[in-house]
Amino acid sequence: MNKVGIIGYGITPFTKEDKKIESVLLDSAKELFKNNQKINRDDVDAVLVSTNNNSKYLSPILSEMVGIQPKIAHSIENLCNSGTNSIVSAYSYIASGMADLVLVTGAERYDSPGSILEWDNSRGEYKHPIFWASIFAKSYKREFSISDEQLALVSVKNHKQAKENPNALSNKTYTIEDVMNSKKLTEDLRLLDCSRPCTGSSSIILGSEEKVKELSENPVWITGIGQKTTSAGFTKNTSFSSMESTRQACETALKMSKKNIKNIDVVEIHDAFSVCEPMALESLGFIKEGYGMNMIKELHSTDNFKINPRGGLIGCGHPLGATGIAQTIEITQQLQSNASKRQVDDANIGLIHNMSAAATSSTVLVLEK
Amino acid sequence: MSFEIKLNDGIFCIPECNECKKIVWPPAEFCNHCFGIVSLKEGDFEAKIIEFSSKNEQYFCIVEFEKTFRIIATIFKTPNIGQSVKISKCGISNGNYFFVVI
């Protein structure tokens, strides 16, 4: 397999703006080409669009808007992990030799239809994500004797970190009391425990080894990929206090990169809801089951940005199709020592965790300098 | 007769493969194991509560049937983990399935 690296990226602030999806897509793609003027757009072999938006033919539309006539152009939808799925597809095109340069752009509007999986009728009338998240929270708290106040720290930490991210939806900090006093959505979930749907766009361009060496002075390589789908329906999860697809995806990604979890310096976690962060940390193998909040407390108290430096989904907002790409951009910036006040010391190896529909599917990527 | 037609009439059925006898959930015409034809079992099925939470004082819970498949249902009284329940009401409303257990 050919080596695949990241050449450049473009990202714009996540907002609540009411804009056409085509304009949202263009925002970050335009930014990418402005920031990477050495890239000749005629050399882009493939344009992949990650979105849950129902608009048609978005990849050819984006290609036309940025003046590219690619060999390959199509959209990819896989709910919340559409972004990393698109990056995996781009990787595959390059690794197989079908393409040398692939643009991946993710975009979503605040009113994305991707928030609800209509097909999952086993959820009855409880199809909104707050219901699976409440079940996760209740189950996690019960199994490991964790309180609502303890879980609230995830939101406090991630909003604090998002404050250093100019592209984040949130620029406010909150206390545990603020989280506890925010609107109670269910018995186990408050408003500030949740990531918010928003309008946002992020673009990344991947290349073959030859292209990366030609076009990037500070290359970052994708060295590990793991994916796992255990089901589509939430009620088929074998556990509601851990993430089996995440565990398996991480195992595959680490094996491919010939690394172990202790080698990872900086991490993007899919914290769609506060309980997801400790659950994911445990399922990825950073800490044993039930101790995720101890790790989060320690990192927060020492202002260590190792987990979710950009502020996670809770702090940044969650434009579904753009999220996995934005997470990958953050890890790229970290490995390039280009993350400003969010910079984690000695970041050489990073990991991205992106998942869909209550962790029924997960993608894990390992990136290295 | 399809699962949805029965459900719309307020009857909860368990879909089972005629060939391999596997419960096929979510309901489908064909078995996802052997592709055999699936038929519907009617009955007063018992389920166990696996987990629950509540919204606006209304409880919702995950219940498991025949140690095989699960649904999310409404329950009006305070639930307990492991509690045995039965479907008291079900149907389709605005395109969504709904289940109530007691």
Image: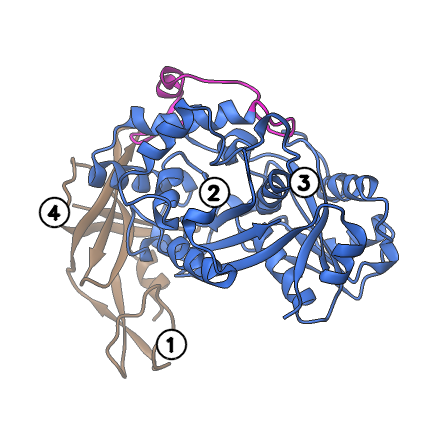
Chain colours: A blue, B brown
Q: Is residue A189 magenta?
A: yes
Residue topped by disc 4:
B83
**Disc 3, disc 2: CB below 8 Å?**
no
Q: Are marks 1 and 3 on the same chain?
A: no
Residue topped by disc 3:
A201
Q: Are marks 3 and 4 on the same chain?
A: no
Type of residue at label 2?
A: His
Chain for disc number 1: B
Q: Is residue A207 magenta?
A: no
Chain for disc number 4: B
- The image position of residue A270, as x and y in percent, is 47, 42
Q: Which residues are magenta?
A: A163-191
* Residue beneath the point at 28% across and 52% down: A239
Marked residue nearer the N-terminal end (4 or 1): 1
Chain for disc number 3: A
Residue topped by disc 2:
A270
**Quarter occupied by the N terminus of chain A:** bottom right
Secondary structure state at the residue bearing disc 3: strand
Q: Are marks 4 and 1 on the same chain?
A: yes
Relative to B16, does residue A107 appear above or below in the rendering?
A: above
Closer to the eye: label 2 or 1: 2
Q: CA distance from mark 4 to mark 1?
A: 32 Å
Type of residue at label 1?
A: Phe
* Residue beneath the point at 22% across and 70% down: B41
Nearer the observer, A89 or A80: A89
Nearer the observer, A222 or B59: A222
Marked residue nearer the N-terminal end (3 or 2): 3
> Which image quadrant is residue A292 in?
top left
**Disc 2, disc 1: CB below 8 Å?**
no
Q: Are marks 3 and 2 on the same chain?
A: yes
Type of residue at label 3?
A: Ser
Q: Are marks 4 and 2 on the same chain?
A: no
